[in-house]
Amino acid sequence: MNNNDFIVQVALHEHRVFAEEIVEEMAESAKARGTGIAKRSPEYVAGKMQEGKSVIAFHKDGTWAGFCYIETWSHGQFVANSGLIVSPKYRKEGLAKAIKEEIFALSRKLYPKAKIFGLTTGLAVMKINSDLGYEPVTYSELTQDEEFWKGCQSCVNFDILKMKERKNCMCTAMLYDPKEKKHEAAKEFAEELQKKPKLYERFMRIKQRLIEKKGGSDLKSLLLFLAVINK
């Protein structure tokens, strides 16, 4: 199976019939990973479709295959591509990357001046984000909109986030800034992840140890450290 087997497009009004299935799969996926997500209702997801602020994927036989939607924060200054989900039967086919690329393009079209950000613990998402030009950043560089951070309350690591006064957690923050013409750091990070898959495992182990210490960790210093030890 390859990407030619799928149709990835901006979701339309008539796709609202898939909203309940999408929400259920989001919840099941989070449960399987042992993580939490900002829970959304079928009505919320359907609203994103109607507003033209989401991307949906189908197998060529018409079966629903994946989804992602756009959220805005801080009066449109920040954009998050949220709720990325791929149906279990279509995972490991490169579909997540295709959906991320489409929702990223839609975000740039609708909000050309906004910073696009995300929080993730997944290697695959970090690779995709890096390829798109996202760079690892500290939490202070993200939106400080209280509504966004409320979405973390359902995560199993929320106590860590509170303990660190919202300055750090197990997720890695990544940001695309349209004002930055060059994204060399993002490209280098993506290349390192591609060449040395075990780098990510070491990254997460070291980050967890540093977070458990008083004061947390400086993500940029951590990335520099990893780059040095892996040369």
Image: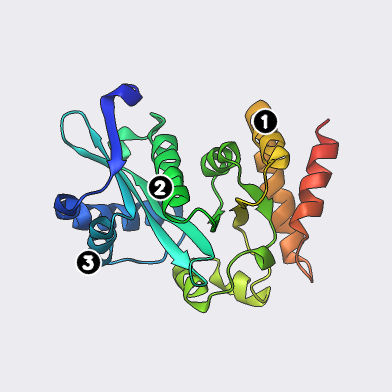
Q: Whole-Å distance between the Cαs marked 3 and 1?
A: 40 Å
Q: Is residue 56 left or right of residue 62?
A: right
Residue carrying label 3: 43
Q: Residue at x 31, y 37 (%)?
A: 8
CA distance for labels 3 and 2: 21 Å
Residue at image x 75%, y 66%?
Answer: 216
Q: Quadrant of the C terminus?
A: top right
* 139 relative to 108, above or below: below
Q: Residue 191: which disc?
A: 1
Instruction: Look at the image and tell me in which quarter the N terminus lies.
Output: top left
Q: Earlier in the sequence, mark 3 or mark 2?
A: 3
Q: Position of residue 167 (x, y in %)?
A: 68, 70
Q: Which mark is residue 106?
A: 2
> Percent x, y for residue 164?
68, 73
Q: Determine whether, in the image, residue 215 is placed left or right of residue 205.
A: right
Alpha carbon separation for disc pair 1 and 2: 25 Å
Indicate which disc residue 128 carries: none
Question: What secondary structure is found at the residue carrying circle 2?
Answer: helix
Residue drawn where x is 50% and y is 53% of the image: 112
Secondary structure of the residue carrying numbered label 1: helix
Tell me if mark 3 has few (under 14), some (14-19) or many (20+) residues whose alpha carbon lies within 10 angstroms of its own: few
Going by the numbered disc 2, the residue's amino acid type is Leu
Q: Is residue 68 left or right of residue 166?
A: left
Amino acid type, residue under disc 1 in the picture: Glu
- Indicate which disc, 1 or 2, sits on the residue closer to the N terminus: 2
Q: Is residue 13 visible?
A: yes
Nearer to me, 101 or 122: 101
User: Vertical placement of 98 versus 145: above or below?
Assistant: above
Nearest to N terminus: mark 3 or mark 1: 3
Q: Give the quarter of the image for residue 192.
A: top right
